[in-house]
Structure formats: C-alpha cells, structure tokens
Image (cartoon, rainbow, N blue to C red):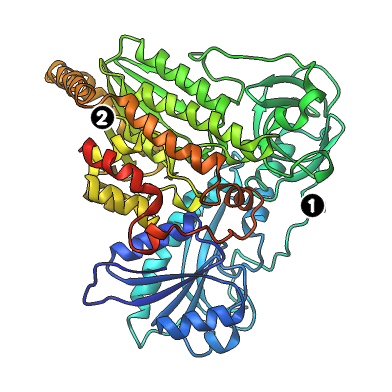
Amino acid sequence: MPVIGPQSETSVRILLLCSSFNGLTQRVWTELRADGHEVVVQTAGSDDIVRRAVATVDPELILCPFLRERVPDDVWRTRRTVILHPGPEGDHGPSSLDWAISGAEPDWGVTALEAIADMDAGPIWATRTFALPADPPRKSALYAGPVTDAAVELAREVVARAANPTFVPRPLDPTRPVRGRLRPTMRQTDRAFSWSDPTEHVLRRIRAADGSPGVRTVLAGLPVSVFDAHRGPATPGEPGTIALRRHGAVLVRTGDGALWIGQLRRVSADDGPRVKLPAAAVLGDRVAHVPESLEPLEAGEADGYREIAYRRRGAVGVLSFDFPNGAMSTTQCHRLAAAVRFAAAQDTAVIVLRGGQFFSNGIHLGVIEARPDPAMEAWRNIVAIDDVCREIITCTHQLVVTAMNANAGAGGVMLGLGADEVLLRDGVVLNAHYRTMGLSGSEYWTYVLPRRVGADEAGRLTGECLPIGAAEAARIGLADRVLPGSPAEFDAAVLDHAARLATSPGLANRLAAKAAARAADEQRRPLETYRVQELAEMSRDIFDDRYGFAAARHAFVTKQPAPAAPVPAARRSGETGRHAALREAAHQAV
C-alpha cells in the first residue's frame, strides 16, 4: 500500500516489512509519514513476495517492527534492514513479553538491531527501556502501550541514523552485561497453572498470555483457553469452581481467593467455534445455575471487574467503558445505551465518555460469528450500537466530551464523533472506515463524520481505508485537541478540561446553541433518516453478503488470511461502490 507523506529535505524511502498491519505497525506508519518520509507497507509472505517489494520500492531502509518471519538473506545482505525487537539488548526469541510478565521483570525494553543470519542477534542501532508495573500487566496492554511507544521512538531514531551513510551500528558484545538473554518460545506447559495455586500466581500466568494465545485449563468440565483476568472477592468453595457471573464474566475460585475471567475460547471445535467470547457464553448451560451478580452503575470499585462505570466529579459525570479488544456485543451495547441515558439524566454540566485499553472497535465480530444465525446477530448488533450513538447525539442539555485514550476503529470512531468535543491522547491511531470488513457502515456516520470533516474528507477516509494518527485527525477536524502524556496523565488532563467547561461562564450560551443546532438539523433532515438509509445499505451487506462480510468476519476472528473482497464495478471506475447510495446523505449533512 504505497502512500507518500509530505516530503522533507531529509526524507527517507522506507519499506515497512511486517507480519501484520496491526496497531503497532499502523502507529509507526502514521508517525513516519507525519515526519515526511515515504513509507510503503508490505506484509511478509513468501521470500519472493519480499524480494518483489524490495525491487519495486527500492528502499533506502527496510524497517521490520516485531517481524516474526525471517528476512531473506539476499535482502538483508544488500539493503539496510533493521528489526525492532520487543526485548532489551541481548534478548532473543519470539516470546519476550510473555517471559517478562510471567517472570515479574522490574523493567523491559525494545531494541533496534540489524538483521543478520541469527535472528535478534545483530548489531545494535538503538535501544529503549521502561519500567514494568508490579501489578502484572496484560500482555496486550503492555504491547499497545509502553512497547509501542518505545518502538515509535526507536523507529524515528533508526530513520535518522539511516540518513547518515557513515553511521555504523554497535556490535552486540557478548562480554558486556545485558538484561536480555535467549528465551525459547513459551509453550502451554510453561504457562500451566492449577486453580488451587495462589491468586497472584494464576493472575500473572493468564495476563502473560492475554490477547494471544491464552492459557489452557478446564472450567465447568470444558477445556478452554482463558483470557481477561481480574481479581475478585474470595468466596468459600473448591478451587476451579465458579461462584458468580457478572455481565458475561465468571468468578473462579483459586487457592486463596478468586479471579474474574472475562473471556474464554474453546480448545476443541467439537463443542462450537474456536472464537474468543464472553466466558459465560462459552460455558453456556454449564453455568446456568450460577447466580448473577449485577453491580449498580455508580458503585465503588467493583471487585476487580467492571465493564461500564459512572462516577461523578462535581459537575462532571465520567462514563467509563472497557470492553475486551474494543468489541461491543448486542448486550454490551444495550447496557451502554442505558448507561448513557443514566448519565444524561443527571444534573451534571458535562459528560465524559472514556474508553479503556481500546476506545471502541464497533460491533463484536466474535459473538456474531459464534451465533447459529450470524447475519441476524450482526443485524441486532448494528441496531444496538446505533442506539448508543443516538443517545450521545441527542443529549442536548449537557456537553459531551469523548476522551479517546487508545485506538479506535470503524463504528467505534463514529460513536465518539457524536460528542461535542473529541480529545485524543497523542499516539492514538484511528481507522475511520468499514470497507475492509465488507460493510457500508452505520452509527450515523453519514451525519457525524461529514459534520466534522466535510463530505469530501469523509469520502476519502471511508474510501481509502487507511489509518490516521492523532496529529492528522486534529488537522482535518476529526478531533478537537491532542493531549500528550501517559494514559493516567491524559485522563487527568481530560478531567481538568471537562471541569473548566462545566464552570465556564459561557456554558449556558453554548448549551443553548447546541440545542438550537440539533433542532435545526432535525428540521432540515430528521436524524432517523440517516439511520434508515445506512441500515438499508447494511441490510444488503449483512443478509445478501454483497461485499464478502461473512468471509471477512470469519477470517478476522479465526486469524486467517483475509479473502479478496468482491469489487463493485462502480469502485473499479473510481467511485466507491458501497458508498454511492450514501454519498448524497453525507453531502446533505454538511
């Protein structure tokens, strides 16, 4: 996907060679583009694919962020090729983060090293280190947070050094004391635990495998892989038995306490699809007798597990939601819509919508895939997330602030755009498009997106299907402000900003203007018509499967290569076929 950013005098032509175009790779891509470099992305396949990409791009630098595949010898011998490895200097092996978390390492790092015959053993271009928290982090959170931040810093440093033809990387000195060492691939036998083990031991084992591959165990007689573990209240009973359910999670007794387990995946396909799902959904009738523990929305710290919470800070109401992987099922959307209505019914002046490890990635493809009738579940899910968006858009007696602390995609981006202000943490990556999943999109995108960026820019974002960084999002009007700092610093800055809004002398006038603008928009074209037109297109995507949604969804949740999507004739001639019927609505919304 060749995309050339704004060129500078020190522009470097870079081939970004990666195992997948995931959040980390997208972050590196957006940041280097913003720096003015020409960056071409190529996912590593066969050696011949890599060689063809090198011949086509003729890169001055090949940069490989966390590449799992080996670079062909004839490539790294003739081109400057630098690997970004998620471990400190001297570290080797594909399971670096897994070992770091399970071994309770106090600090960790990322290293940029030159490709040689031995993987992860080449000369050092640069390195970064960072502290690891004493509380075991989830591997997915560690990867998306400090590891990605360090990788971006290193990518910039490597590119700067690559522009200097006299730079020579430092050889790895085997006599020099280093933190890293050769670590083998972590196997399930290395991850194994017993539910009779101490809670902290089990928690660390599960979090070291969170995201992928999970830890295999048995719950309620079913072999599963477990994910998304949180401390819970101790309850009497046999370790490994299930004490409670809460919003899809199950509370599993351990040797000295209990853990909430949010997600499971079947080990065998004999009992259903091997898709990561809410734990209670995987266990099904096996936990039908287990009591449900439903906490009030405004309760205090909720035994280590809470997907949605509301807290009041003076005149500011903070509605937090944290769904694994940012995926929002039909049930989760119903609960979130109810929470937004609750927040809007309070006498606060400002509502802050705050996401978790991911802000939101829209509908829950895993739950959809696992249903007996996936098309019908997809329809229910899209209608439910539309309901959440409508509650946000129609909240007119409070200012609504979206705080995107982390990445967002597809309908999750559009959900956030329904607010009055959108604040991004520096480094957040947004994918404001649907097409790669074979969908036209809903979530009132034909209203909220062109309202912010204009019809032409909305068409580009949803048609090109490329990620954008925080700086570009602010430049084009997709976001109002970009705030620097760590997640905790961002949250504090958002609260300060919301408090200033809530006490601003111009608040009453701003709220009156907001209500008048919504009324004028409704008079010009009712909000419901955007939804009806979007859902008319989505019904064809879902039930007629005109753009390959079923195959794309299955490939995504099972981590298979994405199939080639059907290409409409209109798109082949330059028009984005699936958006042609929505283009008029987008222009009318401006």
Of residues 86 and 275, the one drawn nearer to the viewer in this rendering: 275
Q: Residues within 10 Å of mark 1 (few under 14, many from 20)?
A: some
Q: Quadrant of the N terminus?
A: bottom left
Q: Position of residue 478 (x, y in %)?
A: 27, 43
Q: Using the rendered view, name the quadrant where residue 515 is placed.
A: top left
From the image, tell me which residue sits under label 2. 420
Q: Position of residue 162 (x, y in %)?
A: 37, 79
Using the image, tell me which numbered label, if any, was put on residue 188: 1
Of residues 176 and 373, the one drawn nearer to the viewer in this rendering: 373
400 lies left or right of 513: right
69 lies left or right of 546: right
Look at the picture and state if 531 lies above or below 271: above
Residue at figure coordinates x 25%, y 77% from the top left: 10
Tag 1 or tag 2, which sits nearer the N-term? 1
Q: Using the rendered view, name the quadrant where residue 59 is placed.
A: bottom left
Q: Do the CB atoms of the residues marked 2 and 1 lie less than 8 Å apart?
A: no
**Visible residue check, residue 170:** no
Question: CA gap, disc 2 to disc 1?
Answer: 47 Å
Q: Residues within 10 Å of mark 2 (few under 14, many from 20)?
A: some
Residue at figure coordinates x 33%, y 51% from the top left: 461
